[in-house]
Amino acid sequence: MPLLDIKNLTLEIPHEGKLIKALDKVSLTVREGEIRALVGESGSGKSIIVTVISGATPPNWRVTADRMTWNGEDLLNISAERRRTIMNREIAVVFQNPLTALDPSVKIGAQIKESIPNELVVGKYFWQRAARRKKTTISTLHKVGIKDHLGVMNSYPHEISTGIGQRIMLAMALVAQPKIIIADDPTRGMETKTKTQILKLLTKLNVTRSVAVLFVSHDLLAIASMANSMTVLYCGQTVESGKMKNLKKRPLHPYTKALIDSAPSFRSDLSHKTLLPALSGSIPALQNVPIGCRLGPRCPRAQRECVNVPSPRRIHEHTYSCHFPLHREKR
Amino acid sequence: MALIVNELYHISNKTKFELGPISVTVEKGKSLAIIGENQSGKSLLAKILVGATKLSGGNIVLHGVRSDSRERKKAIRMMFQFSSHTLNPSLSVKKILEEPLIRNTSLSATERVFLIEQTLIQVGLLREHLHFYRHMLSDGQQQRIALARAIILSPKVLVADEPFATLDPSIRSQTINLILKLQDELGLSFIFISHNLGIVRHIADNVMVLDKGKAVEIGKTETIFRWPKHDVTKRLITSYQSLIPQQTLTD
Protein backbone atom coordinates (compact mmCIF):
# COMPACT_ATOMS: atom_id res chain seq x y z
CA MET A 1 0.00 0.00 0.00
CA PRO A 2 1.35 3.43 -0.84
CA LEU A 3 2.25 5.64 2.09
CA LEU A 4 0.98 8.82 0.54
CA ASP A 5 -1.62 8.51 -2.18
CA ILE A 6 -2.98 11.53 -4.00
CA LYS A 7 -5.34 11.17 -6.94
CA ASN A 8 -6.75 14.03 -9.01
CA LEU A 9 -5.97 16.77 -6.53
CA THR A 10 -7.39 20.11 -7.64
CA LEU A 11 -6.70 23.34 -5.84
CA GLU A 12 -8.52 26.55 -6.59
CA ILE A 13 -7.37 29.95 -5.40
CA PRO A 14 -9.70 32.96 -5.56
CA HIS A 15 -8.16 35.81 -7.52
CA GLU A 16 -10.03 38.98 -8.51
CA GLY A 17 -13.44 37.35 -8.16
CA LYS A 18 -12.52 34.26 -10.15
CA LEU A 19 -11.24 30.87 -9.09
CA ILE A 20 -7.86 29.96 -10.54
CA LYS A 21 -6.92 26.32 -10.79
CA ALA A 22 -3.44 26.33 -9.31
CA LEU A 23 -3.35 22.55 -9.38
CA ASP A 24 -5.32 20.64 -11.98
CA LYS A 25 -5.86 16.95 -11.31
CA VAL A 26 -2.47 16.16 -9.87
CA SER A 27 -1.73 12.56 -8.94
CA LEU A 28 1.17 11.53 -6.78
CA THR A 29 2.00 8.40 -4.83
CA VAL A 30 4.87 7.69 -2.52
CA ARG A 31 5.51 4.11 -1.44
CA GLU A 32 7.18 3.03 1.75
CA GLY A 33 10.96 3.37 1.63
CA GLU A 34 10.95 5.01 -1.77
CA ILE A 35 12.69 8.17 -2.96
CA ARG A 36 10.33 10.01 -5.23
CA ALA A 37 11.28 13.19 -6.98
CA LEU A 38 8.73 15.87 -7.76
CA VAL A 39 10.10 17.91 -10.62
CA GLY A 40 8.82 21.17 -11.98
CA GLU A 41 9.89 24.68 -12.79
CA SER A 42 8.91 27.70 -10.75
CA GLY A 43 5.18 28.28 -10.90
CA SER A 44 4.44 24.63 -11.56
CA GLY A 45 2.87 24.31 -8.11
CA LYS A 46 5.35 21.95 -6.53
CA SER A 47 5.64 24.01 -3.38
CA ILE A 48 1.85 24.33 -3.29
CA ILE A 49 1.57 20.54 -3.20
CA VAL A 50 3.87 20.50 -0.18
CA THR A 51 1.63 23.11 1.48
CA VAL A 52 -1.49 21.08 0.76
CA ILE A 53 0.04 17.88 2.12
CA SER A 54 1.14 19.64 5.28
CA GLY A 55 -2.34 21.14 5.64
CA ALA A 56 -1.14 24.74 5.87
CA THR A 57 -3.58 26.04 3.26
CA PRO A 58 -5.37 29.36 3.87
CA PRO A 59 -9.14 28.95 4.51
CA ASN A 60 -10.17 30.50 1.18
CA TRP A 61 -8.28 27.96 -0.93
CA ARG A 62 -10.53 25.18 -2.16
CA VAL A 63 -8.96 21.73 -2.13
CA THR A 64 -10.77 18.86 -3.82
CA ALA A 65 -9.45 15.42 -4.59
CA ASP A 66 -10.71 11.99 -5.54
CA ARG A 67 -8.37 10.54 -3.00
CA MET A 68 -5.79 11.97 -0.66
CA THR A 69 -4.74 9.46 1.92
CA TRP A 70 -1.91 9.06 4.34
CA ASN A 71 -1.35 5.43 5.36
CA GLY A 72 -5.03 4.72 4.63
CA GLU A 73 -6.33 7.76 6.53
CA ASP A 74 -8.21 10.37 4.54
CA LEU A 75 -6.32 13.64 4.87
CA LEU A 76 -9.18 15.78 3.57
CA ASN A 77 -11.70 14.83 6.25
CA ILE A 78 -9.63 14.59 9.34
CA SER A 79 -9.84 16.34 12.67
CA ALA A 80 -7.37 19.15 13.20
CA GLU A 81 -5.97 17.39 16.22
CA ARG A 82 -5.30 14.10 14.41
CA ARG A 83 -3.74 16.02 11.55
CA ARG A 84 -1.38 17.76 13.95
CA THR A 85 -0.34 14.43 15.38
CA ILE A 86 0.39 13.07 11.92
CA MET A 87 2.35 16.17 10.94
CA ASN A 88 4.23 16.02 14.19
CA ARG A 89 5.13 12.37 14.24
CA GLU A 90 4.92 10.87 10.78
CA ILE A 91 5.49 13.53 8.14
CA ALA A 92 8.50 15.81 8.35
CA VAL A 93 8.89 18.79 6.05
CA VAL A 94 12.23 20.40 5.28
CA PHE A 95 11.54 23.86 3.92
CA GLN A 96 13.39 25.72 1.21
CA ASN A 97 15.22 28.34 3.19
CA PRO A 98 16.48 27.32 6.63
CA LEU A 99 17.02 30.95 7.58
CA THR A 100 13.34 31.79 7.26
CA ALA A 101 12.07 28.50 8.64
CA LEU A 102 14.02 28.73 11.88
CA ASP A 103 13.13 31.07 14.74
CA PRO A 104 15.71 33.87 14.63
CA SER A 105 15.48 34.68 18.34
CA VAL A 106 16.04 31.20 19.78
CA LYS A 107 19.28 29.26 19.86
CA ILE A 108 19.41 26.28 17.52
CA GLY A 109 19.95 23.75 20.32
CA ALA A 110 16.75 24.86 22.06
CA GLN A 111 14.80 24.70 18.80
CA ILE A 112 15.86 21.13 18.10
CA LYS A 113 15.13 20.06 21.69
CA GLU A 114 11.68 21.58 21.44
CA SER A 115 10.82 19.61 18.33
CA ILE A 116 11.36 16.23 20.02
CA PRO A 117 7.90 14.79 20.77
CA ASN A 118 7.20 14.18 24.46
CA GLU A 119 6.51 10.47 23.96
CA LEU A 120 10.05 9.89 22.83
CA VAL A 121 11.55 11.42 25.96
CA VAL A 122 11.81 8.87 28.74
CA GLY A 123 12.63 9.65 32.36
CA LYS A 124 10.72 10.08 35.56
CA TYR A 125 12.01 13.45 36.66
CA PHE A 126 12.38 16.66 34.68
CA TRP A 127 16.17 16.68 34.91
CA GLN A 128 16.30 13.19 33.51
CA ARG A 129 14.04 14.21 30.67
CA ALA A 130 16.10 17.33 29.95
CA ALA A 131 19.27 15.26 29.86
CA ARG A 132 17.58 12.83 27.52
CA ARG A 133 16.51 15.61 25.18
CA LYS A 134 20.03 16.94 25.08
CA LYS A 135 21.44 13.51 24.35
CA THR A 136 18.99 12.92 21.49
CA THR A 137 19.76 16.35 20.04
CA ILE A 138 23.50 15.74 20.07
CA SER A 139 23.24 12.28 18.55
CA THR A 140 20.91 13.55 15.81
CA LEU A 141 23.31 16.37 14.99
CA HIS A 142 26.09 13.83 14.67
CA LYS A 143 23.89 11.76 12.40
CA VAL A 144 23.40 14.62 9.96
CA GLY A 145 27.14 15.17 9.86
CA ILE A 146 27.67 18.08 12.23
CA LYS A 147 30.73 17.39 14.36
CA ASP A 148 30.89 20.62 16.33
CA HIS A 149 27.54 20.07 18.06
CA LEU A 150 28.17 22.49 20.95
CA GLY A 151 29.10 25.35 18.65
CA VAL A 152 26.03 24.82 16.49
CA MET A 153 23.62 24.37 19.39
CA ASN A 154 24.77 27.61 20.95
CA SER A 155 24.46 29.74 17.83
CA TYR A 156 21.50 31.61 16.40
CA PRO A 157 20.20 30.85 12.91
CA HIS A 158 21.87 33.90 11.33
CA GLU A 159 25.29 32.75 12.50
CA ILE A 160 25.39 29.56 10.46
CA SER A 161 25.87 28.86 6.75
CA THR A 162 23.12 27.56 4.47
CA GLY A 163 24.64 24.09 4.23
CA ILE A 164 24.70 23.70 8.00
CA GLY A 165 21.24 25.28 8.22
CA GLN A 166 19.87 22.68 5.83
CA ARG A 167 21.40 19.92 7.97
CA ILE A 168 19.79 21.40 11.06
CA MET A 169 16.42 21.40 9.31
CA LEU A 170 17.01 17.73 8.49
CA ALA A 171 17.98 17.04 12.10
CA MET A 172 14.78 18.70 13.32
CA ALA A 173 12.82 16.60 10.87
CA LEU A 174 14.55 13.43 12.05
CA VAL A 175 14.12 13.71 15.81
CA ALA A 176 10.46 12.71 15.58
CA GLN A 177 11.43 9.56 13.61
CA PRO A 178 9.07 10.24 10.71
CA LYS A 179 7.95 7.81 8.03
CA ILE A 180 8.47 10.33 5.26
CA ILE A 181 10.64 13.37 4.74
CA ILE A 182 9.33 15.98 2.35
CA ALA A 183 12.27 18.06 1.22
CA ASP A 184 11.24 21.23 -0.58
CA ASP A 185 14.17 22.22 -2.79
CA PRO A 186 16.80 21.57 -0.13
CA THR A 187 19.75 22.04 -2.48
CA ARG A 188 18.74 25.32 -4.09
CA GLY A 189 21.66 27.65 -4.70
CA MET A 190 24.17 25.34 -3.09
CA GLU A 191 27.64 24.70 -4.37
CA THR A 192 28.28 21.21 -5.70
CA LYS A 193 30.19 19.91 -2.69
CA THR A 194 27.58 20.81 -0.07
CA LYS A 195 24.89 19.58 -2.41
CA THR A 196 26.43 16.13 -2.77
CA GLN A 197 26.78 15.89 1.00
CA ILE A 198 23.11 16.69 1.60
CA LEU A 199 22.03 14.25 -1.10
CA LYS A 200 24.24 11.50 0.33
CA LEU A 201 22.75 12.16 3.75
CA LEU A 202 19.19 11.81 2.44
CA THR A 203 20.08 8.60 0.59
CA LYS A 204 21.76 7.21 3.69
CA LEU A 205 18.69 7.91 5.83
CA ASN A 206 16.54 6.26 3.21
CA VAL A 207 18.68 3.14 3.20
CA THR A 208 19.42 2.78 6.91
CA ARG A 209 16.05 3.78 8.36
CA SER A 210 13.88 3.14 5.30
CA VAL A 211 12.42 6.61 5.50
CA ALA A 212 10.53 7.55 2.35
CA VAL A 213 11.67 10.79 0.75
CA LEU A 214 9.65 13.14 -1.41
CA PHE A 215 12.30 15.28 -3.06
CA VAL A 216 10.90 18.48 -4.55
CA SER A 217 13.32 20.24 -6.86
CA HIS A 218 14.15 21.23 -10.40
CA ASP A 219 17.76 20.19 -10.20
CA LEU A 220 17.67 17.15 -12.46
CA LEU A 221 21.29 16.26 -11.85
CA ALA A 222 20.66 15.91 -8.14
CA ILE A 223 17.44 14.01 -8.70
CA ALA A 224 18.86 11.57 -11.21
CA SER A 225 21.62 10.62 -8.82
CA MET A 226 19.34 9.54 -6.01
CA ALA A 227 15.66 9.15 -6.86
CA ASN A 228 13.96 5.84 -7.71
CA SER A 229 10.98 7.40 -9.38
CA MET A 230 9.92 10.79 -10.60
CA THR A 231 6.78 12.84 -11.16
CA VAL A 232 6.99 15.78 -13.54
CA LEU A 233 4.74 18.78 -13.07
CA TYR A 234 4.07 21.59 -15.48
CA CYS A 235 1.87 24.54 -14.55
CA GLY A 236 -0.13 22.55 -12.03
CA GLN A 237 -0.67 19.48 -14.20
CA THR A 238 1.13 16.18 -13.86
CA VAL A 239 2.62 15.46 -17.26
CA GLU A 240 4.50 12.26 -16.65
CA SER A 241 5.44 9.95 -13.83
CA GLY A 242 7.25 6.68 -13.56
CA LYS A 243 10.51 4.98 -12.74
CA MET A 244 13.51 7.26 -12.93
CA LYS A 245 15.49 5.11 -15.31
CA ASN A 246 12.62 4.69 -17.77
CA LEU A 247 11.88 8.40 -17.78
CA LYS A 248 15.50 9.25 -18.35
CA LYS A 249 16.03 6.69 -21.06
CA ARG A 250 12.81 7.21 -22.89
CA PRO A 251 10.64 10.18 -21.94
CA LEU A 252 7.21 10.05 -23.55
CA HIS A 253 6.11 13.62 -22.89
CA PRO A 254 7.73 16.48 -24.85
CA TYR A 255 8.14 18.50 -21.67
CA THR A 256 10.02 15.76 -19.84
CA LYS A 257 12.28 15.45 -22.83
CA ALA A 258 12.92 19.21 -22.83
CA LEU A 259 13.74 19.11 -19.12
CA ILE A 260 16.18 16.25 -19.51
CA ASP A 261 17.76 17.88 -22.54
CA SER A 262 18.29 21.09 -20.60
CA ALA A 263 20.95 19.43 -18.45
CA PRO A 264 24.04 19.24 -20.68
CA SER A 265 25.63 16.79 -18.24
CA PHE A 266 23.37 13.97 -19.39
CA ARG A 267 24.49 14.17 -22.96
CA SER A 268 27.78 12.71 -23.98
CA ASP A 269 27.10 13.25 -27.69
CA LEU A 270 26.68 17.01 -27.34
CA SER A 271 29.65 18.82 -28.84
CA HIS A 272 31.20 21.82 -27.18
CA LYS A 273 29.41 25.19 -27.46
CA THR A 274 26.53 23.96 -29.60
CA LEU A 275 23.05 25.33 -29.03
CA LEU A 276 20.99 23.41 -26.51
CA PRO A 277 17.54 22.20 -27.49
CA ALA A 278 15.09 24.48 -25.68
CA LEU A 279 11.36 25.06 -25.60
CA SER A 280 10.44 28.52 -26.82
CA GLY A 281 8.44 30.94 -24.72
CA SER A 282 8.23 31.11 -20.97
CA ILE A 283 6.22 29.60 -18.17
CA PRO A 284 2.75 31.23 -18.11
CA ALA A 285 1.57 32.95 -14.95
CA LEU A 286 -1.19 31.22 -12.99
CA GLN A 287 -3.68 34.01 -13.76
CA ASN A 288 -3.73 33.20 -17.47
CA VAL A 289 -2.85 29.61 -18.12
CA PRO A 290 -3.81 28.22 -21.54
CA ILE A 291 -6.80 25.90 -21.78
CA GLY A 292 -6.38 22.20 -22.40
CA CYS A 293 -2.88 20.89 -22.14
CA ARG A 294 -1.05 23.77 -20.51
CA LEU A 295 2.14 23.08 -22.41
CA GLY A 296 0.20 23.63 -25.67
CA PRO A 297 1.58 27.02 -26.84
CA ARG A 298 5.18 26.02 -26.17
CA CYS A 299 5.00 22.45 -27.40
CA PRO A 300 6.67 21.62 -30.73
CA ARG A 301 4.24 18.73 -31.32
CA ALA A 302 1.02 20.57 -30.46
CA GLN A 303 -1.99 20.05 -32.73
CA ARG A 304 -5.65 20.90 -32.62
CA GLU A 305 -6.56 18.18 -30.12
CA CYS A 306 -4.30 19.80 -27.54
CA VAL A 307 -7.01 22.29 -26.52
CA ASN A 308 -8.59 19.38 -24.65
CA VAL A 309 -6.93 18.22 -21.49
CA PRO A 310 -5.29 14.87 -22.30
CA SER A 311 -6.34 12.07 -19.99
CA PRO A 312 -3.57 10.16 -18.29
CA ARG A 313 -2.51 6.99 -20.07
CA ARG A 314 -0.63 4.18 -18.50
CA ILE A 315 1.97 1.68 -19.68
CA HIS A 316 3.00 -0.55 -16.77
CA GLU A 317 4.37 1.79 -14.09
CA HIS A 318 4.71 4.70 -16.46
CA THR A 319 1.92 7.29 -16.61
CA TYR A 320 1.83 10.19 -19.04
CA SER A 321 -0.70 12.76 -20.25
CA CYS A 322 -0.14 13.71 -23.85
CA HIS A 323 -2.08 13.39 -27.10
CA PHE A 324 1.06 12.98 -29.17
CA PRO A 325 3.67 11.22 -27.07
CA LEU A 326 7.18 10.63 -28.30
CA HIS A 327 6.54 6.94 -28.88
CA ARG A 328 9.04 6.04 -31.47
CA GLU A 329 11.89 8.20 -30.44
CA LYS A 330 14.57 6.16 -28.81
CA ARG A 331 17.53 7.77 -27.10
CA MET B 1 43.35 41.33 -29.07
CA ALA B 2 42.40 40.14 -25.69
CA LEU B 3 41.74 40.94 -22.10
CA ILE B 4 44.95 40.46 -20.17
CA VAL B 5 44.99 40.42 -16.39
CA ASN B 6 48.50 40.91 -14.97
CA GLU B 7 49.30 39.98 -11.38
CA LEU B 8 45.95 41.34 -10.21
CA TYR B 9 46.01 41.75 -6.45
CA HIS B 10 43.45 42.93 -3.93
CA ILE B 11 43.38 43.11 -0.16
CA SER B 12 40.21 44.31 1.52
CA ASN B 13 40.60 46.70 4.43
CA LYS B 14 37.79 45.31 6.54
CA THR B 15 38.16 41.54 6.34
CA LYS B 16 41.82 41.35 5.33
CA PHE B 17 40.77 38.97 2.56
CA GLU B 18 43.54 38.60 0.02
CA LEU B 19 42.80 37.96 -3.62
CA GLY B 20 45.47 37.09 -6.11
CA PRO B 21 47.94 37.64 -7.55
CA ILE B 22 46.01 36.39 -10.57
CA SER B 23 47.22 36.43 -14.15
CA VAL B 24 44.94 35.28 -16.92
CA THR B 25 44.29 36.02 -20.58
CA VAL B 26 40.88 35.84 -22.24
CA GLU B 27 40.98 35.84 -26.03
CA LYS B 28 38.36 37.54 -28.17
CA GLY B 29 35.20 35.43 -28.53
CA LYS B 30 36.28 32.94 -25.88
CA SER B 31 34.66 32.08 -22.56
CA LEU B 32 36.34 31.80 -19.19
CA ALA B 33 34.51 30.12 -16.33
CA ILE B 34 35.46 30.88 -12.74
CA ILE B 35 34.63 28.05 -10.36
CA GLY B 36 35.37 27.52 -6.71
CA GLU B 37 33.78 27.10 -3.33
CA ASN B 38 31.95 29.79 -1.40
CA GLN B 39 34.14 32.56 0.02
CA SER B 40 36.86 31.89 -2.53
CA GLY B 41 36.71 35.40 -3.96
CA LYS B 42 34.84 34.69 -7.21
CA SER B 43 32.40 37.57 -6.96
CA LEU B 44 35.14 39.93 -5.78
CA LEU B 45 37.20 39.09 -8.85
CA ALA B 46 34.20 39.81 -11.09
CA LYS B 47 33.68 43.17 -9.38
CA ILE B 48 37.34 44.09 -9.82
CA LEU B 49 37.23 43.17 -13.50
CA VAL B 50 34.36 45.55 -14.20
CA GLY B 51 35.87 48.26 -12.02
CA ALA B 52 33.30 48.26 -9.23
CA THR B 53 36.06 47.52 -6.71
CA LYS B 54 39.54 49.03 -6.93
CA LEU B 55 42.51 46.75 -7.21
CA SER B 56 45.46 47.05 -4.86
CA GLY B 57 48.10 46.00 -7.35
CA GLY B 58 48.66 44.71 -10.86
CA ASN B 59 46.72 45.85 -13.89
CA ILE B 60 44.04 44.91 -16.38
CA VAL B 61 44.83 45.54 -20.02
CA LEU B 62 42.18 45.40 -22.72
CA HIS B 63 43.36 45.67 -26.33
CA GLY B 64 46.49 47.40 -25.15
CA VAL B 65 44.55 50.01 -23.13
CA ARG B 66 45.27 50.22 -19.39
CA SER B 67 42.62 49.45 -16.81
CA ASP B 68 41.66 52.82 -15.37
CA SER B 69 40.64 54.47 -18.62
CA ARG B 70 37.05 55.39 -19.39
CA GLU B 71 37.17 53.40 -22.63
CA ARG B 72 37.82 50.18 -20.82
CA LYS B 73 34.92 50.72 -18.45
CA LYS B 74 32.62 50.96 -21.44
CA ALA B 75 34.10 47.83 -22.97
CA ILE B 76 33.66 45.57 -19.94
CA ARG B 77 30.06 45.22 -18.77
CA MET B 78 28.50 43.14 -16.06
CA MET B 79 25.43 40.97 -15.57
CA PHE B 80 24.38 40.33 -11.99
CA GLN B 81 23.17 37.22 -10.24
CA PHE B 82 19.61 38.24 -9.37
CA SER B 83 18.60 40.10 -12.49
CA SER B 84 15.22 41.00 -11.02
CA HIS B 85 16.86 42.76 -8.07
CA THR B 86 19.03 44.88 -10.31
CA LEU B 87 16.16 46.32 -12.33
CA ASN B 88 14.58 49.40 -10.79
CA PRO B 89 10.88 48.62 -10.26
CA SER B 90 9.82 52.22 -10.81
CA LEU B 91 11.59 52.71 -14.15
CA SER B 92 10.36 51.41 -17.47
CA VAL B 93 12.58 49.17 -19.59
CA LYS B 94 13.31 52.15 -21.86
CA LYS B 95 14.63 54.25 -18.95
CA ILE B 96 16.67 51.34 -17.62
CA LEU B 97 18.36 50.78 -20.96
CA GLU B 98 18.70 54.49 -21.72
CA GLU B 99 20.74 55.24 -18.61
CA PRO B 100 24.04 53.72 -19.79
CA LEU B 101 23.60 55.41 -23.18
CA ILE B 102 23.08 58.87 -21.66
CA ARG B 103 26.11 58.47 -19.46
CA ASN B 104 28.49 56.96 -21.96
CA THR B 105 27.53 58.13 -25.45
CA SER B 106 26.58 61.37 -27.20
CA LEU B 107 23.63 59.88 -29.09
CA SER B 108 20.47 61.95 -29.60
CA ALA B 109 17.14 60.86 -28.08
CA THR B 110 15.85 59.28 -31.30
CA GLU B 111 19.12 57.45 -31.90
CA ARG B 112 18.99 56.13 -28.36
CA VAL B 113 15.48 54.75 -28.80
CA PHE B 114 16.50 53.16 -32.08
CA LEU B 115 19.50 51.48 -30.48
CA ILE B 116 17.39 50.27 -27.54
CA GLU B 117 14.87 48.74 -29.93
CA GLN B 118 17.64 47.03 -31.87
CA THR B 119 19.11 45.60 -28.69
CA LEU B 120 15.72 44.38 -27.46
CA ILE B 121 15.21 42.49 -30.71
CA GLN B 122 18.74 41.13 -30.47
CA VAL B 123 18.01 39.51 -27.11
CA GLY B 124 14.73 38.08 -28.36
CA LEU B 125 12.23 40.61 -27.03
CA LEU B 126 9.82 42.93 -28.85
CA ARG B 127 9.73 46.69 -29.41
CA GLU B 128 6.64 46.86 -27.19
CA HIS B 129 8.68 45.84 -24.18
CA LEU B 130 10.08 49.40 -24.12
CA HIS B 131 7.17 50.54 -22.01
CA PHE B 132 7.06 47.58 -19.66
CA TYR B 133 7.98 47.70 -16.01
CA ARG B 134 9.81 45.03 -14.07
CA HIS B 135 6.73 43.38 -12.56
CA MET B 136 5.18 42.87 -16.00
CA LEU B 137 8.06 40.68 -17.18
CA SER B 138 8.70 37.02 -16.45
CA ASP B 139 11.99 35.73 -15.01
CA GLY B 140 13.40 34.89 -18.41
CA GLN B 141 12.43 38.27 -19.82
CA GLN B 142 14.02 40.07 -16.87
CA GLN B 143 17.19 38.12 -17.53
CA ARG B 144 17.03 39.24 -21.14
CA ILE B 145 16.67 42.88 -20.09
CA ALA B 146 19.71 42.48 -17.84
CA LEU B 147 21.58 41.01 -20.78
CA ALA B 148 20.38 43.82 -23.05
CA ARG B 149 21.64 46.38 -20.54
CA ALA B 150 25.01 44.66 -20.49
CA ILE B 151 25.44 44.53 -24.27
CA ILE B 152 23.86 47.85 -25.28
CA LEU B 153 27.20 49.69 -25.24
CA SER B 154 28.61 46.94 -27.50
CA PRO B 155 31.21 45.81 -24.97
CA LYS B 156 34.15 43.57 -25.75
CA VAL B 157 33.90 41.63 -22.53
CA LEU B 158 30.85 40.48 -20.60
CA VAL B 159 31.28 39.51 -16.95
CA ALA B 160 28.44 37.57 -15.34
CA ASP B 161 28.07 36.54 -11.71
CA GLU B 162 26.09 33.28 -11.62
CA PRO B 163 23.81 34.22 -14.49
CA PHE B 164 22.07 30.83 -14.63
CA ALA B 165 21.72 29.93 -10.96
CA THR B 166 18.26 31.32 -10.37
CA LEU B 167 16.74 30.34 -13.71
CA ASP B 168 14.46 27.41 -14.43
CA PRO B 169 15.83 24.69 -16.71
CA SER B 170 13.93 25.62 -19.88
CA ILE B 171 14.63 29.35 -19.49
CA ARG B 172 18.23 28.52 -18.67
CA SER B 173 18.72 26.70 -21.97
CA GLN B 174 17.26 29.72 -23.77
CA THR B 175 19.65 32.10 -22.02
CA ILE B 176 22.64 29.87 -22.76
CA ASN B 177 21.66 29.70 -26.42
CA LEU B 178 21.25 33.47 -26.52
CA ILE B 179 24.68 34.08 -25.02
CA LEU B 180 26.30 31.58 -27.38
CA LYS B 181 24.60 33.29 -30.31
CA LEU B 182 25.65 36.78 -29.23
CA GLN B 183 29.17 35.59 -28.61
CA ASP B 184 29.25 34.27 -32.13
CA GLU B 185 27.80 37.47 -33.64
CA LEU B 186 29.60 40.13 -31.63
CA GLY B 187 32.82 38.33 -30.76
CA LEU B 188 32.18 38.84 -27.06
CA SER B 189 34.60 37.52 -24.50
CA PHE B 190 32.50 36.00 -21.76
CA ILE B 191 33.69 35.60 -18.18
CA PHE B 192 31.24 33.90 -15.87
CA ILE B 193 30.95 32.40 -12.43
CA SER B 194 28.93 29.24 -12.04
CA HIS B 195 28.31 26.36 -9.69
CA ASN B 196 26.72 24.31 -12.43
CA LEU B 197 29.69 22.38 -13.78
CA GLY B 198 27.58 20.81 -16.52
CA ILE B 199 27.05 24.22 -18.07
CA VAL B 200 30.68 25.19 -17.45
CA ARG B 201 31.82 22.13 -19.32
CA HIS B 202 29.48 22.89 -22.18
CA ILE B 203 30.14 26.58 -22.83
CA ALA B 204 33.51 27.50 -21.32
CA ASP B 205 36.75 27.37 -23.31
CA ASN B 206 38.92 27.87 -20.26
CA VAL B 207 38.34 27.32 -16.58
CA MET B 208 39.90 29.05 -13.61
CA VAL B 209 39.62 27.43 -10.18
CA LEU B 210 39.77 29.79 -7.23
CA ASP B 211 40.46 28.78 -3.66
CA LYS B 212 40.82 31.24 -0.77
CA GLY B 213 41.63 34.05 -3.18
CA LYS B 214 44.30 32.14 -5.09
CA ALA B 215 43.92 30.87 -8.63
CA VAL B 216 44.97 27.27 -8.04
CA GLU B 217 44.43 26.02 -11.55
CA ILE B 218 43.84 27.61 -14.94
CA GLY B 219 43.48 25.61 -18.10
CA LYS B 220 41.43 24.28 -20.97
CA THR B 221 38.00 23.03 -19.92
CA GLU B 222 38.44 19.47 -21.14
CA THR B 223 41.88 19.19 -19.55
CA ILE B 224 40.61 20.40 -16.18
CA PHE B 225 37.58 18.12 -16.26
CA ARG B 226 39.56 15.07 -17.33
CA TRP B 227 42.84 15.53 -15.53
CA PRO B 228 42.35 17.82 -12.54
CA LYS B 229 45.69 18.42 -10.82
CA HIS B 230 45.05 20.46 -7.71
CA ASP B 231 43.21 18.95 -4.73
CA VAL B 232 40.51 21.63 -4.74
CA THR B 233 39.80 21.02 -8.42
CA LYS B 234 39.75 17.27 -7.86
CA ARG B 235 37.24 17.70 -5.05
CA LEU B 236 34.96 19.89 -7.16
CA ILE B 237 35.15 17.63 -10.18
CA THR B 238 34.64 14.38 -8.28
CA SER B 239 31.64 15.72 -6.39
CA TYR B 240 30.19 16.76 -9.74
CA GLN B 241 31.05 13.42 -11.36
CA SER B 242 29.48 11.53 -8.48
CA LEU B 243 26.13 12.99 -9.54
CA ILE B 244 26.43 11.74 -13.09
CA PRO B 245 26.29 8.01 -13.65
CA GLN B 246 28.49 6.07 -16.09
CA GLN B 247 31.27 8.67 -16.34
CA THR B 248 34.44 8.20 -14.35
CA LEU B 249 37.63 10.13 -13.82
CA THR B 250 40.62 9.05 -15.84
CA ASP B 251 43.81 9.14 -13.87
Image (spheres, coloured by chain):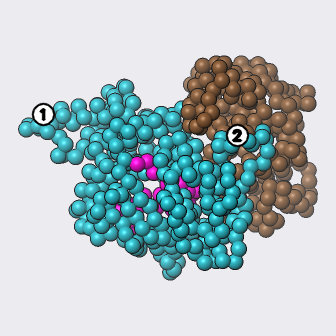
Chain colours: A cyan, B brown
Q: Measuring 53% from the left and 69% from the top, which residue is drawn there?
A: A312
Residue under label 1:
A128
Instruction: Give me the residue at 58% from left, 73% from top.
Output: A310
The furthest residue to the left: A124
Q: Amino acid at mark 1?
A: Gln
Q: Chain of mark 1?
A: A
Q: Which residues are magenta?
A: A34-58
Mark with earlier residue (1, 2): 1
**From the viewer's perspective, is A94 left or right of B245?**
left
Q: Please, which chain is the residue tagged with disc 2 on? A: A
Q: Is residue A24 left or right of residue B223?
A: left
> For the view shown, which residue lies furthest in the bottom direction?
A17
Badge number at residue B220: none
Give the residue at x 62% y 61%: A253
Image quadrant holding the N terminus of chain A, namely bottom left
Q: Does A57 lie within the magenta span? A: yes
Task: Give the mark toward the camera: 1 or 2.
Answer: 2
Q: Residue A27 at what x, y percent from top left?
A: 46, 65
Where residue A295 appears, x then y in whole percent?
64, 67
Residue A5 versus residue B87 in the image, above or below:
below
